[in-house]
Image (cartoon, grey):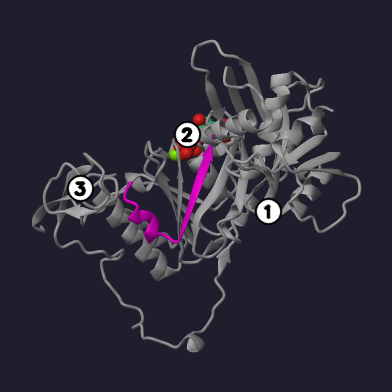
């Protein structure tokens, strides 16, 4: 039995300290240091018999053999796009997200769809619970194996017998290894079990997908170093009360992080959404004031979203400003610009702003649609549903250009929009027939253009 030793870990940044402190000297967070028992001689080895396969030696760049990354397609178009074409052999992917967002559902769906032999290890649900879930998503004829286990040594024992081609772990926080005595979910356990799984992935060229929980600050629970250790970090997000889910990549050693995947949670599992604009815009018969359509880009994909604003006389002395899906600071900025540059008296009004579908957008190009929806609600004049907007608002009230305007216009045209309002400073390289371009330079002009 190894000598029992304990050290102090910061639960926020993962730094190791010799003694307890109130404030972590590495990340300056308070009350984050906790004692964890570790045994000194931890053998970081996924197999008991350690074999060093090849001795590495330095090479010149031109001498390095390039073997194309072998990828295993996941049979899930959205996930493949986010990964850059499938799971790279020997890679470790971390999928983070809030509880109940659908991480287990997504990975089970993928595990059941893949033609390769998958071992799905769950430390959270029993085999029958997983069976019930698999029945819901109606895909049963698969060679995927389900194991409920939390001890990594036991998992590796199973792996040696089964030699799966893909390993899924649900979730890294439930795993524990014998080489360390700390409890599951603690910093040192997460670090050690991840290191074992990485060693396994690299040595056997098996792709490993880990599910990671998110803490209340929205970071993957466990030390930040976990994100440094793995090859790909994916984030599954969305509003639990809405059905849409967005899969983003935060880090990808084998592809771009700009791609994103959109899913809809149905009673039969997650459905891939290939034309998201249609579902994000509510179809209504009558023209209502306070809504405007924005053309945004999420990654490389143009996306039409609907912005709703409600401007009403303030009930309290301090007017309320509430947003969903849009930055509150930015709303304050936009309101100040409207007040100062365009003379709208909004200081005594409550302003509520909502992006439909429960998704949140940080593309500054939606500013113009935000302004349009606020003006529309304030004047109680509806904007024609065939108009869409894309431009950023500057502090001086100028309408600023946005990136990839051609792509946005093409998408708007494809979806049947008749008018596209953008900045006059945007260089548009092509003349598009079938969609009218309105180009504005100052925020004052927007109102005149819209309701003239
Ligand atoms: P789950 O994958 O368990 O989330 P996570 O692993 O991220 O915690 O998903 C849980 C939610 O998904 C649950 O609230 C129910 C819902 N759900 C559906 O709506 N349809 C389905 O087919 C499935 C399997 C789950
Ligand atoms: Mg789960």
Labels 3, 1: front one: 1
Vertical side of 36 occupied by 165: above or below: below
Q: Which residues are magenta?
A: 222-238
Residue position for label 3: 182
Q: Nearer the viewer, residue 60 or 420?
A: 420
Q: Nearer the viewer, residue 64 or 199?
A: 64
Rendered residue at 68%/50% (across/down): 402
In this picture, residue 117 sits left or right of residue 152: right
Q: Magenta stretch: residue 226 in it?
A: yes
> In the rendered image, which residue does mark 1 sit on?
403
Nearer mark to the viewer, of 2 and 1? 1
Residue 206 place in picture, x, y as percent: 46, 64
At 79% across and 55% down in the image, what residue appears? 428
Sequence-first disc among 2 and 1: 2
Q: Which mark is residue 340?
A: none
User: Which one is earlier in the sequence, the residue at label 3 or at label 1?
Assistant: 3
Residue 284 image offset from top left, x and y in percent: 78, 24
Position of the N terminus, as image quadrant, is bottom left
Q: Which residue is mark 2?
A: 100
């Amino acid at each position: 039995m190894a000598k029992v030793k304990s050290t102090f870990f910061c639960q926020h940044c993962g730094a190791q300290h010799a003694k307890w402190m109130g404030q972590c000297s590495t990340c300056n967070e308070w009350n984050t240091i906790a004692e964890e028992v570790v045994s000194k001689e931890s053998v970081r080895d996924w197999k008991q018999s350690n074999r060093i396969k090849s001795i590495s030696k330095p090479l010149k760049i031109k001498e390095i053999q390039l073997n194309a990354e072998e990828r295993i397609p996941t049979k899930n178009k959205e996930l493949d796009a986010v990964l850059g074409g499938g799971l790279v052999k020997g890679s470790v992917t971390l999928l983070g997200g809030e509880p109940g967002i659908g991480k287990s559902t997504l990975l089970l769906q993928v595990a059941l769809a893949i033609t390769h032999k998958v071992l799905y290890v769950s430390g959270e649900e029993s085999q029958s619970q997983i069976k019930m879930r698999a029945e819901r998503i109606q895909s049963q004829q698969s060679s995927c194996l389900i194991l409920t286990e939390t001890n990594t040594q036991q998992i590796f024992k199973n792996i040696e017998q089964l030699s799966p081609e893909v390993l899924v772990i649900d979730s890294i926080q439930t795993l524990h290894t014998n080489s360390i005595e700390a409890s599951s979910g603690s910093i040192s356990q997460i670090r050690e079990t991840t290191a074992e799984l990485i060693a396994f992935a690299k040595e056997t060229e098996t792709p490993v997908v880990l599910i990671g929980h998110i803490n209340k600050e929205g970071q993957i629970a466990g030390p930040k170093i976990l994100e440094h250790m793995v090859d790909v970090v994916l984030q599954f997000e969305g509003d639990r009360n809405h059905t849409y889910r967005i899969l983003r990549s935060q880090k990808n050693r084998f592809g771009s992080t700009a791609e994103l995947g959109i899913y809809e949670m149905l009673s039969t599992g997650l459905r891939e959404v290939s034309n998201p604009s249609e579902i994000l815009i509510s179809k209504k018969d009558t023209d209502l004031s306070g809504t405007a359509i924005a053309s945004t880009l999420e990654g490389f994909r143009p996306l039409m979203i609907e912005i709703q604003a409600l401007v009403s006389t303030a009930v309290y002395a301090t007017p309320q400003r509430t947003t969903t899906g849009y930055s509150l600071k930015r709303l304050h900025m936009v309101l100040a610009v409207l007040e100062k540059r365009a003379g709208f008296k909004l200081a005594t009004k409550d302003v509520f702003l909502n992006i439909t579908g429960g998704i949140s957008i940080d593309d500054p190009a939606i500013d113009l649609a935000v302004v349009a929806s606020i003006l529309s609600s304030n004047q109680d004049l509806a904007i024609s549903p065939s108009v869409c907007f894309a431009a950023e608002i500057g502090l001086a009230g100028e309408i600023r250009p946005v990136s990839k305007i051609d792509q946005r216009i093409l998408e708007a045209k494809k979806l049947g929009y008749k008018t596209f309002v953008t900045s006059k400073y945007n260089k548009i390289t092509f003349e598009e027939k079938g969609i009218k371009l309105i180009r504005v330079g100052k925020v004052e002009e927007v109102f005149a253009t819209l309701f003239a």
